Amino acid sequence: MVLETLSLLNYKNFDAITFQMDPKINCFTGHNGVGKTNVLDAIYHLSFGKSYFNPITSQNIKHNADFFVVEGNYEKNDRPEKIIVSAKQGQKKMIKRNGKAYEKFSEHIGFLPLVIISPADRDLIIEGSSTRRKFMDGVISQGDSQYLNTLLKYNKTLAQRNSLLKYFAANNTFNQDTLSIYNEQLHEFGTLIFGKRAAFLEEFTPIFLNRYKSISSGNETVGLEYKSQLKENDLLTLLKENITKDKITQYTNFGIHKDDLVFEIDGHPIKKFGSQGQQKSYLIALKLAQFDFIKAQSNVNPILLLDDIFDKLDEQRVEHIIKLVDDENFGQLFISDTHADRTEKVIKKVHQTYKMFAL
């Protein structure tokens, strides 16, 4: 799979611009604020129908414009594919494939597999559990549309149950029969999601550990653990046993929406005990493992975006990562960096075609 051309209209800081891409390596260089990351985010937009950095659609429209259009022309399985993501102020966003609009955005997820490595990934370490759940769900969803649909159903049912708990509190009432309907639905959807997350981590963790070993000195031991309340009991039992707490808080306190991933280094949380370099290596290993997993699931080389790749990493380690890409036939690669000379010096050490775009 190759992105051949990318066209942006009123997207973030761009008026109108078109890029003719190299099938292997593409580098976007320039000072901070010129839009390097925005180009990579536009490519992300084409795969997921949303921005990686700013999920509020209206804020991705250029200032003083009414709409944006991002268009990508791909070659996939020897066939041309045109994807257009567009949004107009006050209207719903639209994704079209070869001229036909998707009824549900979820139908598009996984069609153009993609992995991004960015300084913003540090949120996976420093933010709350929802950020790590989104990462896990994002990896699984790219190869499993049933999982994504079940997750959407779970979240909708959860919102309805929470609204019901608020209604009970506001009206000083309680109806066990109505609550039981939501409990059973959450149990059904949650059990399926829990099983798929557990199976995913079992397969993903060894890949991740291998990746970390290859990009670090290998002196420290890292770990990745799936934490879930459903390991203690089935969800239906947990919901029934904790109804008193739910009524007090007016919120569902147990379920797969409380799951987390525990990141460890030498048996301790990497958030507290890992250096910046170790944390960066951990995150890159996580993302390269994501690449490996999606590639195995889809039999397609995902597009790989390396945003501000030299952030907190020395040139030698960056070179090592680029060589991994070269050695293992990754597919198409997009890089952003502030220094063109530094980027080109590293890129020239791998035996692939490339293009440099100065913004």
Image: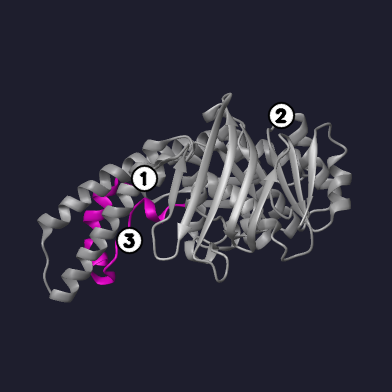
In the image, which is nearer the foreground, mark 1 or mark 3? Answer: 1
Q: Is residue 71 visible?
A: yes
How far apart in space, not on screen, are marks 2 and 3 (Cα)? 45 Å
Q: Is residue 52 above or below residue 147?
A: below
Circle on res. 329: 2
Callout 2, which amino acid?
Asn
Q: Earlier in the sequence, mark 1 or mark 3?
A: 1
Disc 2 is placed on an element classified as loop
Sort mark 3 into few (<14), some (14-19) or many (20+) by Cα contacts within 10 Å.
some
Regarding mark 3 in the picture, which secondary structure is present there?
A: loop
* Magenta region: 231-260
| Quadrant location of the N terminus in the rendered image | top right
Image disc number at residue 104: 1
Residue 51 coordinates in the image, percent (x, y): 54, 56
| Quarter occupied by residue 339 | bottom right
The residue located at (26%, 69%) in the rendering is: 250
